[in-house]
Image (tube, rainbow, N blue to C red):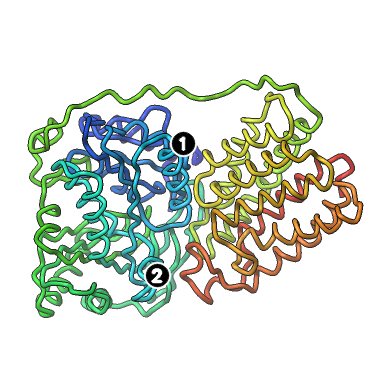
């Protein structure tokens, strides 16, 4: 399918600009950030609810910012999490002194970047809490709900939290109610056709004739399983049965319902499915309360639908029914944007947030020049492999790993260009820029690794032993942030063998260049080994055996980077 763009790499920013231009009566842009905030925000003494994730899901996330719902949203590139820096800036802009609640779907990149921002804000004295949404019943079995993805059920958690904050609840109460909403919410999705990223000619996955994907995600992932296509009544029966089988402990007899379209499936088709959904829920003895049929959380142009149920108690129903006034969703909210119907909060001016671009005062060193050269070589390498990395990522993910790596290294090179100082200083600066630009789990992992590498080099010197210790720090940063070990089918399967082999060669007296060449052989074996692994972490882990048979995109990109960067070491060319 043809996508309407100017430049695919600027799609997110141009989308946000157009959105704010169209809906300035509800929202305004957060200065110097990829995010929006409700008009009239922040408010002194009010808890702020900040939501977010990748672009490509409208109305989520920016479309549900406004009075009575979310106070702000921070967006990453298509299907990629926003960076920790962007989350931090949106949080600072919305802090009214009563605390901030983050809520977002349970995806590794979002968890990493929002978590980095939360820690940073807490160090500055802000009270920031997080409620991760885990409504997707297909992505983990009953009893392991904390491992589930967040999909269309995000909306109910955001709505409850936003309504509680609007009526004046404190942060403890807003957090408690958001947790309760999440615990009461279940979603199941089906895909009838894949979606196509801006700038790409082919969809991330295809669905065979007469088939459908069962339990797909919202980032272009294929389903957990495939099935024969069913008529509308069969689709309704499948969805209702799966959700009722997974009903929360102590569930009552009232449910709020979302019949959600994923981007291409038309409203009329959703109504046909809901005709049977409503009947089946009634036959199961459930009272259907205030259902929503339409697009709430989409996946670009994916053909498909999802069904969400939130089991209601009296307080959840009150918050579900509370007024809201946003660009994409309104409920009995006339005048809310002007403060009517809300607790008595004073609007305050957000802090001025100037760009914090430092000029280097350090002397340029040969090590700094080598670091800049290594970054430039890595950029050329991932640019040449962008399509390959995207194809590998599309096997079990959203296909954006190649473009994210290019964005990240492009930003890292720009940040290092003309910046004096040592190799360590250059890499610390480059790591922050990489994380901010790349977004997603890879942005957090690579950014943290580059930063740790730079800090290690500054502390340890640049002989072979110092290089090994600095790379060990980089590996530890990745493992700590992502939780991966060798065998989990990640970039660790490439980097850890490299670090171990480098250390062995260095301890035997090898030079940096000699140790690097020896370590590359181990890295290549490690990257190749991921082809026969089942993914244990991230989105791909939901696919089980379907994740086997192709090399991991992160392991592959790490190999390209290590090959290229090694050529910047004097005598390091192959």
Label 2 neighbourhood size at 10 Å, few (<14), some (14-19), many (20+)? many
Q: Position of residue 571 (x, y in %)?
A: 89, 43
Asked if 221 appears above or below 342 in the picture, the reply is: below
Asked if 312 appears above or below 322 in the picture, the reply is: below
- Residue 6, disc: 1
Q: Position of residue 289 (x, y in %)?
A: 10, 63
Q: Nearer the viewer, residue 111 or 271?
A: 111
- Quadrant holding the N terminus: bottom left
Between circles 1 and 2, the one closer to the viewer is 2
Asked if 126 appears above or below 224 in the picture, the reply is: above
Q: Secondary structure at mark 2?
A: helix
Number of marks: 2
The single residue placed furthest to the right in the displayed view is 509
Residue 359's image quarter?
Answer: top right
Q: Earlier in the sequence, mark 1 or mark 2?
A: 1
Q: Could you tell me if residue 381 is visible in this image?
A: yes
Residue at (26, 64) in percent of width and height: 183
Q: Nearer the viewer, residue 352 or 238?
A: 352
Q: Which residue is mark 2?
A: 139
Residue 184's image quarter?
Answer: bottom left
Q: Nearer the viewer, residue 202 or 14?
A: 14
């Amino acid at each position: 399918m043809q996508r309407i763009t100017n430049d695919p790499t600027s799609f997110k920013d141009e989308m946000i600009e157009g959105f704010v231009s169209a809906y300035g009566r509800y929202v305004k842009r957060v200065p110097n950030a990829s995010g929006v905030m409700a008009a009239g925000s922040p408010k002194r003494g009010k808890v702020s609810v900040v939501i977010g994730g990748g672009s490509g899901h409208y109305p989520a996330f920016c479309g549900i910012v406004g009075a009575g719902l979310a106070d702000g949203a921070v967006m990453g590139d298509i299907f990629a999490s926003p960076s920790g820096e962007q989350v931090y800036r949106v949080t600072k802009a919305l802090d009214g002194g009563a605390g901030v609640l983050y809520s977002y779907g349970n995806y590794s990149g979002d968890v990493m970047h929002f978590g980095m921002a939360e820690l940073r804000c807490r160090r500055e004295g802000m009270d920031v809490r997080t409620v991760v949404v885990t409504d997707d019943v297909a992505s983990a079995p009953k009893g392991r709900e904390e491992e589930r993805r967040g999909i269309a059920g995000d909306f109910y958690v955001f709505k409850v939290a936003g309504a509680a904050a609007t009526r004046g609840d404190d942060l403890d109460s807003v957090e408690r109610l958001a947790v309760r909403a999440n615990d009461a919410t279940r979603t199941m999705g089906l895909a009838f056709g894949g979606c196509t990223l801006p700038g790409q000619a082919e969809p991330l996955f295809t669905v065979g004739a007469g088939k459908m994907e069962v339990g797909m995600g919202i980032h272009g992932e294929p389903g957990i399983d495939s099935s024969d296509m069913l008529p509308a009544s069969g689709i309704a029966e499948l969805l209702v049965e799966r959700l009722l089988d997974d009903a929360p402990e102590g569930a009552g007899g009232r449910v709020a319902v979302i019949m959600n379209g994923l981007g291409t499936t038309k409203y009329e088709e959703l109504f046909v499915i809901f005709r049977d959904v409503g009947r089946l829920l009634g036959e199961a003895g459930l009272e259907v309360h205030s259902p929503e049929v339409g697009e709430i959380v989409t996946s670009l142009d994916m053909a498909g639908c999802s069904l969400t149920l939130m089991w209601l108690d009296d307080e959840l129903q009150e918050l579900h029914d509370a007024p809201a006034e946003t660009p994409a969703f309104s409920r009995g909210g006339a005048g809310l944007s002007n403060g009517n119907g809300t607790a008595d909060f004073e609007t305050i001016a957000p802090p001025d947030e100037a760009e914090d671009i430092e000029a280097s005062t350090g002397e340029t060193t040969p090590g700094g020049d080598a670091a800049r050269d290594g970054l430039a070589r890595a950029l050329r390498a991932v640019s040449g492999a962008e399509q390959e990395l995207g194809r590998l990522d599309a096997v079990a993910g959203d296909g954006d790993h190649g473009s994210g790596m290019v964005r990240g290294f492009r930003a890292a090179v720009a940040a290092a260009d003309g910046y004096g100082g040592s190799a360590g200083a250059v890499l610390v600066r480059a790591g922050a820029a990489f994380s901010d630009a790349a977004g997603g789990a890879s942005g957090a992992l690579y950014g943290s690794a580059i930063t740790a590498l730079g800090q290690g080099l500054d502390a340890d010197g640049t002989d072979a032993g110092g290089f090994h210790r600095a790379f060990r720090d980089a590996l530890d940063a990745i493992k700590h942030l992502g939780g991966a070990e060798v065998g989990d089918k990640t970039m660790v399967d490439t980097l850890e063998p490299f670090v171990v082999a480098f250390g062995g060669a260095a301890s035997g007296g090898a030079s940096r260049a000699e140790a690097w060449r020896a370590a590359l052989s181990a890295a290549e074996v490690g990257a190749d080994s991921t082809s026969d692994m089942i993914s244990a972490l991230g989105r791909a882990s939901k696919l089980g055996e379907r994740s086997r048979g192709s090399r991991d995109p992160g392991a592959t990109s790490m190999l390209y980077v290590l090959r290229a960067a090694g050529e910047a070491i004097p005598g390091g060319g192959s």
